[in-house]
Amino acid sequence: IAALITSFSALAILFVREGNNNQDHMLMYVTKVVEGLASSFIAPCLAALTLASFGPEEFDSIMASNVLWGHIGSSVSAILAGAAAYILYPNIKWCFFVIAFSALAAILFVPFLPQGDQMMGRGFHNDEKNRIKSTKHNISDSGGETSYCSENSKEKDKSMEAASYISVFSDKKTLVLCLTGFFFHFANANVLLVLGELMSMENNDSNNDGYYYENDDNGKEGETSRSAIPLIAGAIILAQLTMSGATAIGDKLTEHGVGRKTIFLAGLVSLPIRCALIIYWRDAGNGFLLSTQLLDGVGGGFFGLLHPYLVADITFGTGRFNLISK
């Protein structure tokens, strides 16, 4: 459902008419809010399916693979969307078909996903092996199954009782992780937009305002220049490819015993360094500005990889794994 809503949201731009039409702008604002709400379900569901299917022992390695291929898919999608926007210029809104098609393609594979142990996917411990051993022990002692079933049923119900929302959110580790994620995304949200504006301005020396006017690149007044499209697409692709590498490196580092907090902190620190370099290199040329996306890849790669790890560490056993997994 979330992927389907994301697909329709991407296609909503086709209904936006040229010019300053407030109703059309409101349509985009509403669809972006709906898309944000829908997409917030995708990552927690993927993490829950991974935990339910492979258990806590293999969660890290399988989740790292999921995140890695997600970044690779985003890179391919950015390449196709950038190429479509450049070829179809000035009708660049048609490139959103690439995003919609990618979401629809993901829907086709949903039926093939494993479901696993649903209770484990919620963050409960799987005590099946212990229950089997206990079954044999109790049967041999009591000479029947009746006493065991009633006692084991009570123990199972008790063990499967989820922690209260208040107890989860009042946990210090949960609060720190949630606040860290909030401020990281809050600070990172508009950096790419500002970077795109700076590169567009650098690329358009004749007007020095980030736009091309009539007869420039066959564009119309107020439209983004065609030559700026490869720069924006390149910034996204470079970041996603770097995220892929950072995810693979982060996975290997955790396997070799490097602390999760250390890697997570490295991802967080990369953001202020990136912003400082953008300010310092704002007049140095597009090559310098574009290179700052490497730090975006490091930050996004480490953060995207370590965040579900930390969530699992904090919440596993509470039955509230999905509560803070986004």
Image (spheres, grey):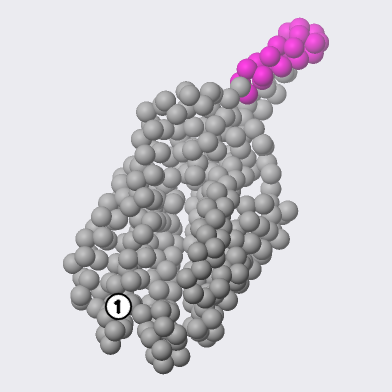
| x and y percentages locating residue 216 in the rendered image | 39, 90
Name the residue: 54% across, 24% down: 163
Name the residue: 58% across, 25% down: 162
Viewer-side residue, 143 vs 285: 285
Which residue lies under the disc numbered 1?
209
Viewer-side residue, 112 vs 198: 198
Q: Residues within 10 Å of mark 1 (few under 14, many from 20)?
A: some
Work out which residue is located at the far left of the displayed protein and give it.
280
Q: Is residue 263 visible?
A: no
- In the structure shown, which secondary structural element does the residue marked by tag 1 occupy? loop
Give the total number of marks visible in the rendering. 1
Highlighted range, magenta: 141-160
| x and y percentages locating residue 311 in the rendered image | 46, 38
| x and y percentages locating residue 254 in the rendered image | 40, 47
Viewer-side residue, 38 vs 46: 38
Q: Is residue 288 left or right of residue 157?
A: left
- The dominant secondary structure in magenta is helix
Q: Is residue 36 left or right of residue 137?
A: left
Mark 1 is on which residue type? Asp
Location of residue 257 (image quadrant): top left
- Judge whether residue 279 is colored magenta: no
| x and y percentages locating residue 102 in the rendered image | 61, 66
- Judge whether residue 151 is colored magenta: yes
